[in-house]
Image (tube, grey):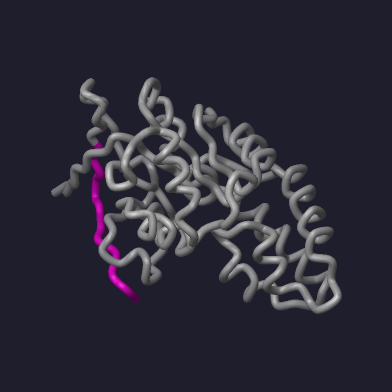
Amino acid sequence: MTSRTTLSAEALLFDMDGTLVDSTVVVERTWRRFARRHGLDADRILATAHGRRTGETVARYAPAGVDVAAETARLVAEEVEDVDGIVPVPGAPELLASLAGARWAVVTSAGRELTHRRMAAAGLPLPSLLVSADDVREGKPSPEGYLTAAAALNVRPAATVVFEDAEAGLRAAAAAGAPAVVVGGHGGPAAEGCPRVRDLREVTVTDTGRGVLRLTLKHPEPVSRA
């Protein structure tokens, strides 16, 4: 029997990588090159890089003496040029097409240029509101991005629903006071108790016409700590 959960929201806030866009192959290529250049453990970097701004990850792992700003600029330039293998998360094109006229935004740890490149490579439309790594002082897990988006859309954070796939992003949503839906298999502490969908094919949004969106999640699974 199909199980369903229904949520209501005045606006929807989407992370990009792993939520709307599957950029896994590009992200792994980029950080493995970085690790090889500096003799680092790529798997250790990849375990924490997802959902965070590039510069913050470089600063955390780069050996002493490395120019963090220059290395960050190099990585960002590599990512902007590398779109081979980028595809939409299943269901993302249909879901975003259904949101015409609705209030929604992308809140991402990627920079603005990179966001444009990846969304275009995945064949996805850009929203009227994009909050990128270039638009905040602090990246996820800081709530700044989600608070900025909610304010720009003139809604309370508690009246939004955030779609996230990474621990840092889920922590950011929780700190902003915004309920979240986990996309994919992430099962970290911040996901505990959140509804989860395998991908966006399990999400349907209906505009009630009264400024409220009705979300139906098929096969939602509450996330428990592993």
Image coordinates of residue 12 in percent, x first then y, are 37, 38
Q: Is residue 169 magenta?
A: no
**Residue 216, picture quadrant:** top left
Q: Main secondary structure of the magenta part?
A: loop
Task: Give the camera-side residue of 24 and 47.
Answer: 47
Task: Give the camera-side residue of 223 and 126.
Answer: 126
Instruction: Tell whether 92 sits left or right of 178.
Output: right
Residue at 81% over, 79% down: 64
Image coordinates of residue 110 in percent, x first then y, are 62, 48
Residue at 62% over, 40% down: 115
**With respect to residue 176, does 10 lie above or below?**
above
**Residue 34, picture quadrant:** bottom right
Image coordinates of residue 210 in percent, x first then y, are 21, 23
Task: Give the number of callouts.
Answer: 0
Instruction: Tell whether 40 sits left or right of 125.
Output: right
Instruction: Tell whether 49 sits left or right of 3.
Output: right
Task: Give the camera-side residue of 72 and 28.
Answer: 72
Residue at 79% over, 77% down: 63
Magenta-colored span: 215-226
Residue at 34% over, 76% down: 226
Image coordinates of residue 207 in percent, x first then y, are 26, 25
Quick one: which residue is furthest to the left in this view? 1
Q: Is residue 225 magenta?
A: yes
